[in-house]
Amino acid sequence: SNYKLMEYFKERLKFQFITAIPNSKKRDTTNWKTTYQCMMRGFKILGILKVVCPNLVLKKEQCNLLIDFLNLRMNKQCKSKYSKKEIEILWKIRRLNLNDDRFKKFQERVKNNKQLSFLKMEIENENNKS
């Protein structure tokens, strides 16, 4: 919630931009501070993840999975298709970040969305296991 701190990180870590995250429309947020997020695209984030990961507690598994994913993608051409291993990693990260209800809703969205069709393979694998 400290914009000056975000600017410091942007300069030091070479983030591309900082955005303010709008407060929730569902709750009274009058006393809430504005929150910000930094954005970095591409493989620049890999170095930061490797430095930060050992210090993480709650998100360490997701961080390690993301590092694995980026290492797999690093030597591929831009917009190349995702491998089965890469899709498995994406699903693991998504599963770790969502509770059961939200994960089921996400699976439904994937089933009904052509842009997310590359993820359908993993849903079929999950269904075959049960």
Image (cartoon, rainbow, N blue to C red):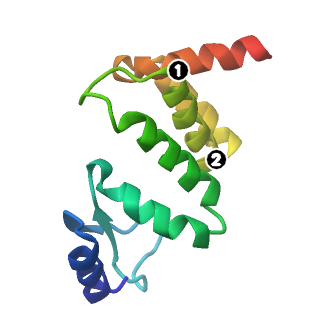
The residue lying at 52 percent from left, 43 percent from top is 68
Classify mark 2: helix, strand or loop. Answer: helix
Badge 2 density bin: few <14, some 14–19, many ≥20, Cα 10 Å: few
From the viewer's perspective, is residue 80 above or below residue 99?
above
Residue annotated with mark 2: 96
Spot the residue most to the right: 130
Rendering coords of residue 12 (x, y %): 26, 78
Mark 2: which amino acid? Leu
Rendering coords of residue 70 (x, y %): 42, 43
Residue annotated with mark 1: 84
The residue lying at 29 percent from left, 78 percent from top is 9
Compare residues 65 and 50 and report the one nearer the observer.
50
From the viewer's perspective, is residue 123 above or below residue 36?
above
Mark 2 and mark 1: Cα distance apart in space: 18 Å
The residue lying at 73 percent from left, 11 percent from top is 128
**Can residue 26 be seen?**
no
Rendering coords of residue 75 (x, y %): 33, 34
In the image: residue 71, left or right of residue 81: right
In the image: residue 89, left or right of residue 11: right
Rendering coords of residue 126 (x, y %): 69, 20
Compare residues 63 and 128 and report the one nearer the observer.
63
Quarter assignment of residue 29: bottom left
In the image: residue 3, left or right of residue 53: left
Mark 1: which amino acid? Lys
